Image: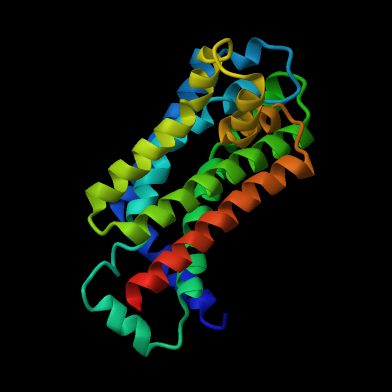
Amino acid sequence: MRLLPIIFKRQLASYASAPGTYLSVAVFLLLCAAQGLYTHHWMEQNNSGLQAFFELHSWLYLLLIPTLATQLWADENSSSFSETMKSLPVTSMEWIIGKFMAAWVVCAVALVLNFPIVIAANYLGTTDNIIITSQLLASWLLAGSYLSVGSFICAIARQRIVIFLLTLGLLLTVSGLISVLDALEHQTPIWIIDSLTSLDPISRFSMMDNGKLTLHDSLYFISMIIAFLSATTVTLNYKNS
């Protein structure tokens, strides 16, 4: 893992030099502000956290995450990359983890840039900053799980538009799963509904989003990240073998 910091810095510099990064983060922040300030009127609620502000992050990430995913392997999707990769003392896992961490840091920056909302909440009402911190961490873990899915799609597709559409489609399907489960509640055995609900990241996020950040739910997202990054590593090794 000696070259992991170099890969991380290189990918972070790639995001910093791409106009699409700034545009997607700006749109994410704008929609976050519109959702929190106007749609839910959270400042009028007697709430120690910002649950109304965070509850739609799973949908807002549908704009941010696919854009970041398309840039993960943008510079490496050339026919000569596999040969270059073989000639360098860098493993596939180093490439994948370094690039994933850079994208995850961009998500963290996007979340931190929502600090005016937190300041306003502290100024205008009674808030619990520990709960808000837990909600921010829950949102970041959700973003990481989405990014790991995008990383896997990058390993099986080359064209940016294909990566974007596949990532968007898969995340959109996951985001809408809870609505499907609610519709099937009376037609499907309860054990199947409970099993699918326990695997649904949106349901997990909804529980964490209200400030109840548990080790069990945190490990679920971390396990999801590890699983998809491992699948990405296996896929990339197979393609380059």
Is 166 on the left-hand or right-hand side of 188? left
Left-right relation of 79 to 151: left
* Residue that appears at 58% across and 14% down: 185
- Closest to the observer: 86 or 144? 86
Q: Position of residue 159 (x, y in %)?
A: 22, 55
Exactly how many numbered labels are in the figure?
Answer: 0
Closer to the camera in the image, 201 or 47: 201
Q: Is residue 104 above or below residue 57?
A: below
Residue 124 image point, x, y percent: 69, 19
Please name the residue shown 51% across and 32% down the image.
58
Is there any visible trace of residue 40 in the rendered image? yes
Task: Quadrant for the C terminus, please.
Answer: bottom left
Decide: is 51 above or below 77: above
Q: Is residue 101 visible?
A: no
- Quarter occupied by residue 135: top right
Write the residue at 32% across / 53% down.
70
The colouring scheme, among rainbow, by chain, secondary structure or one colour, is rainbow
Rendered-image quadrant of the N terminus: bottom right
Please name the residue shown 62% across and 19% down the image.
189
> 199 or 49, which lies in front?
199
> How far across and how far down the image is residue 176, in percent?
46, 25
Up-down relation of residue 32 to residue 84 (above or below): above
Residue 109 at x, y = what percent?
53, 49
Residue 144 vs residue 77: left or right? right
